[in-house]
Image (spheres, helix red, strand yellow):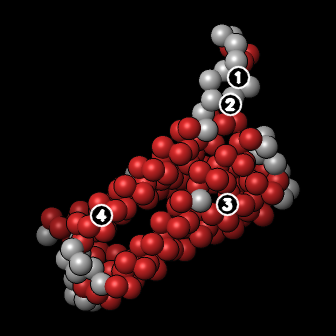
Amino acid sequence: MEKGRVEAFTDGVIAIIITIMVLELKMPHAPTWDALHELWPVFFAYVLSFVYVGIYWNNHHHMFKAVDVVSGPVLWANLHLLFWLSLFPFTTAWMSETGFATLPTALYGVTLLMAAVAWPMLQAQLIRSNGRDGMLARAVGSNVKGWISIVGYVLGIAAAFIKPWLGCVMYAAVALVWFIPDTRIERVQAT
């Protein structure tokens, strides 16, 4: 299969995910600042999830620029990642609609964690399909940010059971780590 089809399918799924999330943003019932202020949990959760989806889309794009071959296991690994990303609208809505209650906030973190676990699985399948001497394998090296993310999500999930807002702070902190795109692939492409 051509990698362009995988990229196009992924782009389409991510576009649908963002569309579903934005549909959760409802108009205020009154033309006042107070009415708008009541929607802050929904807006904050949307922004956080939008940033995460954007991070995954951006890094997916970079990763696929570094490969030529897409195999069956790559397709399944990509679908595995998309499965977890497709749960973002549900967990985002539940978390925001409940005012960041404990269980929804923790489940949101579990969804983030599982997407973070799915990412290196996709990366490993791409490396396996494109060879250890391929551009992606040369670019990846150690995955310090990936491990920091996983630890951050686990701490955020645990924190959600103590103070849900603290879990959200951890999730936002992990997003900040990834907000600047991974430049490892671009450096290898430039050499």
Near mark 4 (Cα within 10 A), the count class, few <14, some 14-19 or many ≥20, is some
Image coords of residue 91 (percent x, y): 66, 54
The disc, 4 or 2, on the residue closer to the chain's N-terminal end is 4
Label 1 SS: helix
Cα–Cα span, label 3 and label 1: 25 Å
- Amino acid type shown at disc 4: Glu
Cα–Cα span, label 4 and label 2: 34 Å
Q: Is residue 165 above or below residue 122?
A: above
Cα–Cα span, label 2 and label 3: 19 Å
Label annotation for residue 140: none
Q: Residue at x 56, y 38 (%)?
A: 23
- 187 left or right of 56? left
Q: Which residue is mark 4?
A: 7
Q: Which residue is mark 3?
A: 109
Cα–Cα span, label 4 and label 1: 38 Å
Label annotation for residue 37: 1
Cα–Cα span, label 4 and label 3: 26 Å
